[in-house]
Image: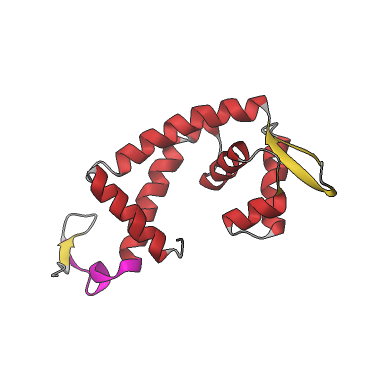
Amino acid sequence: MSIAKNSPDQSGEDFDYDLLPGLIGYNLRKAQAAAFQDFSESLKGCDITPGQFGVLVLIEANSGLNQTRLGNALGIDRSTVVAVIDRLEGRGLVAREPAPSDRRSYALRLSEQGRALLHRARALVLAHEERIAKGLNSKEQAQLIKLLSRLGGAS
């Protein structure tokens, strides 16, 4: 496979990128930056981050989930989970309730306001996904997701 080393930079002038265009990490970072910028623009009116969106999705899909399991699912430490939940709870989007099976733990659920925000955000995220994948057909999209999952260590 031949990768063009020379291509225009932001000024439109020819620029030598040397080995960078052939590096997986370089291309992942460029793609991630573009996707994150579009994601952030898409959710501006919702005032949530990509991480908070993921937390809301997982809580809705697993109502009653505790903070430890949430952190494990996201691959983040307990203190980070607590800080995120504190922010979301402070905004009235998430509620902590004593877990029925373990009074030392909290069960998480979305509030009505959290469900409404997630419903609105979900539609915006799906439109964002369509935009960032517009150059790929459905088979290519599935292949890309599979390859990225393999790189990320997911099964």
Task: Name the one closer to the observer, 81 or 43.
Answer: 81
In magenta segment, residue 36 = no
Residue at 59 percent of width and 54 percent of height: 73
Residue at 31 percent of width and 54 percent of height: 144
User: Residue 47 location in percent, x, y?
Assistant: 55, 35
Image: 96 above or below 14: above
State the quadrant of the N terminus: bottom left
Residue at 22 percent of width and 74 percent of height: 18
Task: Name the one closer to the observer, 43 or 105.
Answer: 105
User: Residue 148 location in percent, x, y?
Assistant: 37, 59
Q: Is residue 132 left or right of residue 36?
A: left
Scheme by which the image is coloured: secondary structure
Q: Is residue 61 left or right of residue 22?
A: right
Image: 4 above or below 45: below
Image: 120 above or below 74: above
State the quadrant of the C terminus: bottom left
Residue at 67 percent of width and 39 percent of height: 88
Q: Which residues are magenta?
A: 14-25
Quadrant of the rendered structure where residue 25 is?
bottom left
User: Residue 23 location in percent, x, y?
Assistant: 29, 70
Toward the bottom, the furthest residue is 19
User: Residue 138 location in percent, x, y?
Assistant: 26, 43
Q: Is residue 106 left or right of residue 128?
A: right
Toward the front, the furthest residue is 101
